[in-house]
Image (spheres, rainbow, N blue to C red):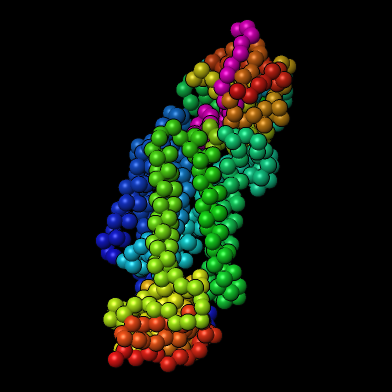
């Protein structure tokens, strides 16, 4: 979290993350091109590079799409989420390199401008087998560019978290377009069923993880789903909430995180102002609720970030009766300080 | 987390090797990119630009996605000296001519007569002869479609890859079919015409109206 914007902020953890990422990408490209050159001596280096970059970007996209649901299902994967934006920008740059190499290889040095050639070289839109799959890849690249270009917190603040999040949900549209790009392109040229099997496995894993995470959250929501009637609703015995952790419930479609700390109970919105991260899956460290996604902090009694930061989330009234925690599901304005309930 | 990261890196490298290994076999072809040798021989513009040098017939193309039709005067067999990069697949050879290296090397020579082998019908993929013979590998298939269209449109002789071989395509009057065939690049078609043989080259003099998509 920051009050002022720097072009890119690196801390030791991010440096380590980025070094591992760059090392992983280079390892993949080296493995693909060296294995390709050794096993297929007739292959040209340009072809191997184009294919290596394409498969690398596609695999990274799968990894990116899997990180969100994996973290929902198991907090052990949270460190992967911490710097997911750098992963996304890296994936875009690899996809861009693939596109540039392909345009140079297949469209340059001819009788037409390479970009015009790309856009008009195949107009068989009416035929599925002959469909210009390149345009699907180009459309996906435009979406990925918009996401990479607006990945900085400056844009998050300017566009508001809601609009920013909606824009970045475009990754699913880009994924669909890329599935079409691969299916109508490479999979039509390659004869080895391995490629179909790996693509199908990728789609199944991404879809399966999202369904599993959605199913789990739906079950949680249903278990604690209350209509907003203006009355306190029971959450659970206070002793059931681990120290410095939260119990989540859903009321009127909003998720509430009820935290226990220092023998006190406070409730705040579960949705982080940064990127809608699940605050209820975070912990209280040094008196602040820490978002598990990117480390944004909030005071549990007021829902406000500690000065000089300015993020605020809604707070909810709580009380304890016979050891059971109750929450009033009507939200107070973001940043409203409420006296915590004390555990006797 | 360390274990997860190591597993991810290992899985990525393994997958890279698996994907690289699983690629469709590449055709045994050759392109001496950037290597220019001097060739002396008799060059002919029709039915397709080619030259005989050292008893071998070489197809001639320009750099990039360009043909060699602009390099030599049409309709004559000329002794020339030129520099070119060899492109080779099987017994078919081609030279990418270095621009400016084409020099007349004597008075008009004798053209080689083409031998007619009758009317034939072929079914196969429309390709550009330059990429197919080795400049790109693979130089065929859906992924290569737009490149083939660009090459054919730029004057590289169009061809049909059929029955495991390459049959070059011209019009009935030996006119290049760049404009007519580029929309069919990368697609499987059936085409009919008079098959002629020029040395080791097979050429189909086809009416573009006879093309049907498979």
Q: Residue at x 51, y 22 (%)?
A: B92
Quarter of image, res A321: bottom left
Whether residue B82 can be seen here: no
Image-based side of A54 in relation to A146, left or right: left
Quarter of image, res A79: bottom left
Q: Position of residue B13 (x, y in %)?
A: 33, 50
Q: Position of residue B176 (x, y in %)?
A: 69, 24
> In front here: B75 or A343?
A343
Residue range of the region highlighted in magenta in the rendering: B115-140
Q: Position of residue A243 (x, y in %)?
A: 29, 82
Q: Is residue B125 magenta?
A: yes
Q: Residue at x 32, y 47 (%)?
A: B14
Image-based side of A238 in relation to B81, left or right: left
> In front here: B16 or A41?
B16
Whether residue A211 can be seen here: yes
Q: Position of residue B64 (x, y in %)?
A: 60, 38
């Amino acid at each position: 979290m920051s009050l002022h914007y720097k072009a890119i902020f690196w801390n030791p953890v991010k440096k380590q993350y980025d070094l591992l990422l760059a090392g992983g990408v280079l390892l993949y490209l080296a493995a693909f091109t060296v294995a390709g050159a050794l096993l297929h001596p007739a292959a040209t280096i340009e072809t191997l590079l184009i294919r290596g970059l394409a498969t690398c970007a596609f695999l990274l996209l799968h990894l990116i799409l899997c990180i969100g649901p994996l973290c929902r299902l198991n907090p052990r994967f949270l460190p992967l989420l911490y710097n997911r934006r750098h992963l996304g920008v890296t994936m875009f740059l690899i996809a861009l390199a693939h596109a540039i190499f392909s345009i140079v290889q297949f469209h340059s040095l001819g009788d037409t401008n390479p970009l015009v050639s790309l856009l008009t070289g195949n107009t068989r839109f009416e035929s599925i087998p002959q469909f210009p799959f390149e345009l699907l890849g180009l459309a996906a690249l435009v979406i990925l560019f918009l996401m990479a270009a607006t990945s900085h917190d400056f844009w998050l603040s300017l566009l508001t978290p809601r609009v920013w999040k909606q824009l970045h949900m475009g990754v699913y549209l880009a994924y669909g377009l890329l599935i079409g790009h691969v299916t109508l392109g490479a999979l039509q040229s390659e004869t080895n069923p391995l490629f179909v099997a790996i693509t199908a496995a990728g789609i199944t894993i991404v879809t399966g993880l999202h369904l599993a995470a959605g199913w789990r959250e739906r079950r949680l929501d249903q278990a604690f789903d209350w209509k907003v009637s203006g009355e306190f609703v029971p959450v659970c015995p206070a002793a059931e909430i681990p120290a410095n952790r939260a119990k989540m419930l859903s009321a009127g479609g909003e998720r509430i995180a009820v935290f226990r700390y220092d023998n006190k109970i406070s409730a705040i919105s579960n949705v982080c102002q940064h990127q809608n991260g699940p605050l209820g899956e975070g912990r209280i460290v040094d008196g602040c609720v820490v978002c598990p996604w990117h480390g944004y902090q909030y005071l549990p009694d007021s829902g406000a970030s500690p000065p000089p930061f300015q993020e605020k989330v809604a707070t909810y009234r709580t009380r304890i009766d016979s050891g059971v925690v109750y929450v009033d599901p009507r939200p107070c304005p973001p940043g409203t300080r409420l006296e915590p309930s004390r555990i006797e | 987390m360390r274990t997860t990261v190591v597993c991810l890196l290992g899985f990525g490298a393994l997958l890279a090797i698996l994907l690289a290994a699983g690629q469709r076999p590449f055709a045994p072809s050759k392109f001496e990119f950037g290597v220019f040798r001097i060739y002396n021989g008799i060059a002919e513009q029709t039915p397709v630009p080619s030259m005989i040098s050292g008893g071998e017939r070489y197809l001639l193309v320009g750099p990039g996605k360009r043909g060699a039709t602009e390099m030599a005067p049409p309709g004559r067999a000329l002794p020339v000296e030129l520099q070119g990069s060899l492109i080779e697949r099987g017994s078919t050879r081609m030279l990418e001519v270095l621009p400016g290296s084409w020099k007349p090397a004597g008075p008009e020579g004798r053209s080689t007569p083409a031998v007619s082998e009758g009317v034939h019908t072929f079914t196969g993929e429309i390709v550009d002869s330059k990429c197919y013979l080795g400049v790109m590998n693979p130089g065929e298939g859906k992924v290569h479609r737009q490149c083939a269209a660009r090459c054919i449109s730029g004057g590289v002789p169009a061809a049909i890859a059929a029955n495991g071989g390459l049959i070059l395509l011209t019009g009935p009057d030996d006119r290049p079919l760049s404009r007519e065939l580029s929309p069919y690049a990368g697609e499987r078609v059936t085409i009919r015409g008079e098959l002629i043989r020029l040395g080791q080259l097979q050429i189909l003099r086809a009416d573009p109206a006879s093309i049907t998509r498979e």
